[in-house]
Image (cartoon, grey):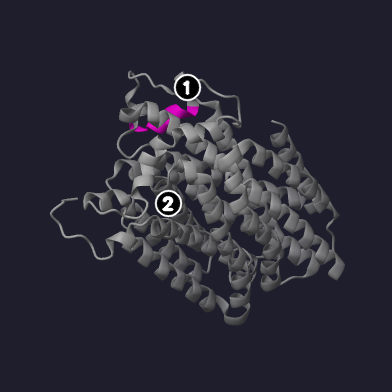
Amino acid sequence: MSKTKSKPLGLEWRSSSLFIVGTVGVGLFTDLFLYGLVVPVLPFILLDRVHLEPAQIQSHVSGLLAAYAGASVIFSLPAGVIADKGSSRQLPFLIGLAAMLIATLLLFLGQTVAVLTVARVLQGISAAVVWTVGLALIIDTVGSHNLGKTMGSMIAFVSIGQLVSPVLGGILYKQAGYVGVFALGSALLLVDFTMRLLLIEKKFAAAYKIEAEGVSGNGSESAEDDSEEIRNTTEEDPLVAKREEDDFKIASNQQEWVKAFPVVYCLKNPRLLTAFLLTTLDATLLATFDATIPTTAMELYGFDSLKSGLLFIALIVPSLLLGPIAGWVVDRYGPKIMAVIGYCILVPVLILLRLVHSGGTSQIITYCVLLALCGLGVGVIGSPALVDASYVVEQYQKRNPDFFGPNGPYGQLYALNSMTFSVGLTVGPLISGSLKDHVGYGNMNLVVALRSNALKVD
């Protein structure tokens, strides 16, 4: 950007940390909101609009959820490479929103499973972009030393989207049909588009020699300045054994494909692989809730879309309240302690979900209480893996700045993180839906609990 150009209107606030983090937060909020908006409605769309048989509903709901996640897996890495190699992260951020707009139109107009599947695929592409480019923007802005509390607070904020979208989706579908659901989604997309368009990255603000808010304490510079602080917090209590500093040095004689995708080299580090494993299994758990709560409520209690959506309040409110606190603890004491605590909460509660059965108000209350306890565990495990993965890659970048280029490898890192998360979202509905159909809802949760316990032990 030329220094002779006049500065854009509102440069200071448009490039401020608060606005950039807020814009990414709204983008993540929109993604999860539109995702959750249709979760409680999907069974009824398939039943009322597509005219499937009731016995086919669970498998098709799981398939549509998996289509979204599968698309995220495929498109995350290209989005990360574009973000790292391009001169700006803003353009791919806007393109991802265009995919979401088309997806929303198709969900509104679709009359067949094929059209609904295409819509979910486009939603998955948009999610790949927003979670990859958005998180890269976050670390450019706040640095990894503040990533835990920033992500904890952001996850709490975007969880509001998860919280209200199933409820509003159920209400609007029941009261106004598809038009009401589409109108709400379109309004949110307009707000999201406006904020993404106004955003100015800090590196461009710096080119105007403007002292944008927080510019001296953020981005890659903050990653350098505070590396010792990060080492004292996260490296003292890592997810796996501490590595020697020399392990982060990369030899110069790397193959061309490694130079083209430099973050791949970082996968040699077992600590990064462990973080990705945690991310995948966390997503599997979340997808299990999305795929089975609406259908279980329909089968056991005769709930419609509205009542099914209301059940998600019990699951998400505890996560919303605990997320920022858990993120602060991760920044201060490292990720391992919070990961262990989270799974210690989840394992016994998942086993207790075997007690859920058909009945009246008392059974519904029991189900809500157990979902709320699950929400506590979900709130705790939200940030440890992401913070640890960011720390590992930062150490590689610090010791090999020329290898990763001026933008660093964070777009590619969060692309891999999005891919592993999406793998969990893909297999979660398929496995949980199949288990629920064959062994029942209670035994399905027992299997999930045993998996979580094995992870806790590891």
Identity of the residue furthest to the bottom in this view: 175
Numbered label attached to residue 245: 1
Q: Position of residue 244 (x, y in %)?
A: 51, 20
Q: How many marks?
A: 2
Which residue occupies the foreground of this view, 365 or 427? 365
Residue at 35%, 58% (x, y): give it: 94
The kind of secondary structure element at disc 1 is: helix
Quadrant of residue 274 in the image?
top right
On the question of residue 56 being in view, the answer is no
Identity of the residue furthest to the left in this view: 4
Numbered label attached to residue 134: 2
What whole-number distance in Å separates the C-alpha atoms at marks 1 and 2?
A: 29 Å
Q: Amino acid at mark 2?
A: Gly
Which residue occupies the foreground of this view, 256 or 239? 239
Q: Which residues are magenta?
A: 260-267
Does residue 33 sit above or below 445 in this rendering? below
CA neighbours of label 2 inside 10 A, class few (<14), some (14 to 19), many (20+)? many
Is 264 within the magenta? yes
Q: Amino acid at mark 1?
A: Glu
Quadrant position of the C terminus in the picture: top right
Which residue occupies the foreground of this view, 420 or 250? 250
The kind of secondary structure element at disc 2 is: helix
Does residue 169 sit above or below 130 in this rendering? below
The answer to whether 169 appears left or right of 215 in the picture is right
